[in-house]
Image: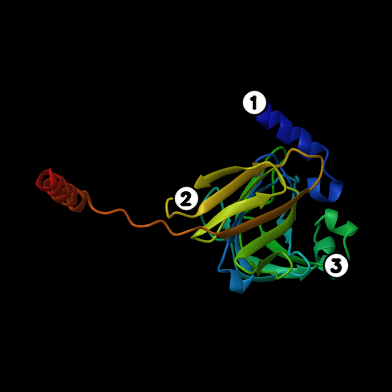
Amino acid sequence: MKILGFLLLAVATLPAQVREYVTADTYTRYELQAPETNSFYIVYEVTETRPGAAYHFNQIRPGSEASNEAVTDRATGKPLEFGVVTGKKAKEEGAGAADRLTDDASYIRVKLAHPVPEKGEARILITKTYKDKASYFAEGDRITFVRPLGIPRNSVVLPLGYQLVSVSIPVQTATESDGRVRVSFLNIAPGEANLRMVAKKAPKMAASRPASERAHQDQIGRASCRERV
């Protein structure tokens, strides 16, 4: 309950252009792809709460090339219709906070399954791939991920075989079932968290010998000792 309270307070103190699209359960997962691609796969869970809203607008960050977009209604699991529009078009269709952005900003416009009822919500899942050399790049044997993140819950999954070297904010680490390292954190600040994460290839561990092989060699070693005695 304390964590939820912190998240609600953080959302309440976010800038208006961010707060309008963010609820305490908003979550983003970034899966870093092979370093040479400068690409990362994004899973974005968000809840639209504006009464009467027929669309949800998700900005495509300047400098990022978006591809492989898909949108799903979390209540039904069915795909939702979507397209890319300018900030000017988004304003005309009720994006709200888009009036604080430039007309040529790009948005993914998601047509909701039905308008948001009073005191209701529409939960959606957006997946996409971004290519952004300024946000994700390699230098020698290290990779760097730099991103200002304004939503409450976030995680970054490193490429397979990489380990965390440094990070600019407090995080928790865990290992995915496929061996990739996942870095997670809560943003309880009254604004964006300026994430800077550095990772490098983990040293390869020598493969352990099978137990039967070790037992056989131990027997040989003991026999050799008896002979020397």
Q: CA distance from mark 1 to mark 2?
A: 27 Å
Disc 3 marks which amino acid? Lys
Q: CA distance from mark 1 to mark 3?
A: 40 Å
Query: How far across and down, in percent of the image, does residue 80 sit?
Result: 59, 61
* Residue that carries the numbered disc 3 in the rendered image: 88
Q: Secondary structure at mark 3?
A: helix
Q: Residues within 10 Å of mark 2 (few under 14, many from 20)?
A: few
User: Which one is earlier in the sequence, the residue at label 1 or at label 2?
Assistant: 1
* Residue that carries the numbered disc 1 in the rendered image: 1
Is residue 12 shown above or below 218? above
Query: How far across and down, in percent of the image, does residue 215 sit?
Result: 17, 47
Q: Residue at coordinates 67% horizontally, 26% vertically from top-left? A: 2
Disc assigned to residue 142: none
Left or right relative to 34: residue 25 = right
Left or right relative to 78: residue 50 = right
Please identify, in this view, whether the residue under mark 1 or under mark 2 is nearer the observer: 2
* Residue that carries the numbered disc 2 in the rendered image: 176
Quarter location, residue 104: bottom right
Left or right relative to 60: residue 29 = left
